[in-house]
Image: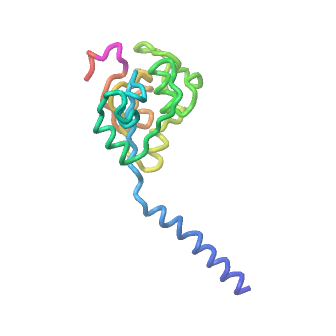
Amino acid sequence: MRRLLFAAAAAAVLLAGPALAQEDMAKPNILVIWGDDIGTWNISHNNHGMMGYMTPNIDRIADEGLSFTDYYAQQSCTAGRAAFIGGNVPVRTGMTKVGLPGAEQGWQQTDVTMATVLKSEGYATGQFGKNHEGDRNEYLPTVNGFDEFFGNLYHLNAEEEP
């Protein structure tokens, strides 16, 4: 019986070690740079100087972290953002095309976003720039997981906002 208890205790200590060490590791920073109408070859990190574009600051960020180069682009900026932030096809959220200000399409209370998941893991979240995922109060980025937002809700009225 003592051997069994000792073996169980030893196994628990051995298995808990990596888990405890993992908890002590700092969470990585996550930065997503999203641009409309930017091809993968417009970033010098990806084109290796073949296109003549130089993006040294983005290159440095990519060199120091991870760079994701494969993504299925959607037919509109709204659909693309919804797919990325929501992690599913835009038809599930209803955000398949650019909506107009005041439209009923936007994040629902039951939708899980990248920001809500990251917040549940202790991250501070922010979105800066064009949002395009609904401008009614219930669709605002700060209601759907982002701690901070500074930007435009739609490009159609961008000159009216910061």
Asked if residue 157 lies in the magenta stretch, the reply is yes
**Could you tell me which residue is drawn at 41 percent across and 22 percent down?**
132
Q: Position of residue 2 (x, y in %)?
A: 70, 87
On screen, residue 84 versus residue 3, left or right, reads left
User: Between 70 and 150, which is closer to the camera in this rendering?
Assistant: 70
Q: Position of residue 15 (x, y in %)?
A: 59, 69
Q: Is residue 156 above or below residue 31?
A: above
Dominant secondary structure of the magenta stretch?
helix
Please identify the quarter of the rendering in which residue 51 is found.
top left
Residue 123 showing in the rendered view: yes
Q: What is the magenta range?
A: 154-158
Q: Residue furthest bottom?
A: 2
Residue 110 showing in the rendered view: no
Please identify the quarter of the rendering in which residue 11 is found.
bottom right
Please identify the quadrant where the N terminus is shown: bottom right
**Could you tell me which residue is drawn at 39 percent across and 47 percent down?**
65
- The mark total stands at 0
**Could you tell me which residue is drawn at 44 percent across and 23 percent down?**
133
